[in-house]
Image (cartoon, grey):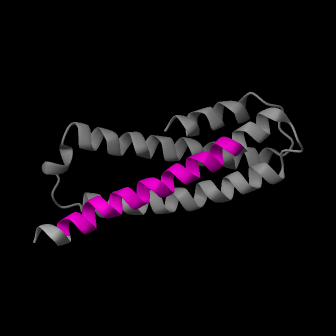
Amino acid sequence: QISLLVGFISVNNSPWTDYSAYSYFQIVTMCDLVMILFFYIIYIFRIYRKLTCVSWPLAEFLHYLIGTILLLIASIVAASKSYNLTGLVAGATFGFLATILCVLSIWSSYKVSCITQSTSK
């Protein structure tokens, strides 16, 4: 998700108006980005076939659900503390964009894991 990285860079390169709000935003965006890359690696190298003790669709669904909620909170806080500084507004905007994309990822992972499995039986 490029929008997470752009939001992180926008906030990082701007003068901060509130340290705790923007450090929280940065932590949430980087943790979300790392977890998305983690799941990409799991699926690209097909590690999920070897680690069958984990329900990977459920783990991915929970990751996106928790990450989306935290990202929405961080974006709201970042937008409220931006005071019309362009870099901070851009970071919050990309945070909201990433939130929308994460909601779409939740929906697509639900459709792939639940709906296709129920129709294939």
Q: Position of residue 44 (x, y in %)?
A: 24, 37
**Left or right of residue 98, residue 119 in this image:** left
Q: Is residue 98 magenta?
A: yes
Q: Main secondary structure of the magenta part?
A: helix
**Left or right side of 42 for 85:** right
- Residue furthest to the top: 13
Q: Is residue 102 visible?
A: yes
Quadrant that contains the C terminus = bottom left
Quarter location, residue 42: top left
Q: Quadrant of residue 69?
A: bottom right
Q: Is residue 33 magenta?
A: no
Image position of 113 with respect to 12: above or below: below
Q: Nearer the viewer, residue 93 or 19?
A: 93
Is 9 placed above or below 96 here? above
Residue 96: give x, y in percent of width and height: 64, 50
Span highlighted in magenta in the image: 93-117
| Residue located at (70% from left, 32% from top) | 10
Name of the residue lying farthest toward the front: 119
The residue at the point 42 percent across, 53 percent down is 105
Q: Check the image and name the residue furthest to the right.
A: 83
Please tell me whether residue 80 is drawn above or below residue 66 in the rendered image.
above
Q: Is residue 6 left or right of residue 81?
A: left
Which x, y percent locates residue 6?
61, 32
Q: Residue at x 79, y 30 (%)?
A: 14
Q: Residue at x 41, y 61 (%)?
A: 107
- Using the image, determine if residue 48 lies above or below residue 62: above
Residue 50 seen by the camera:
no
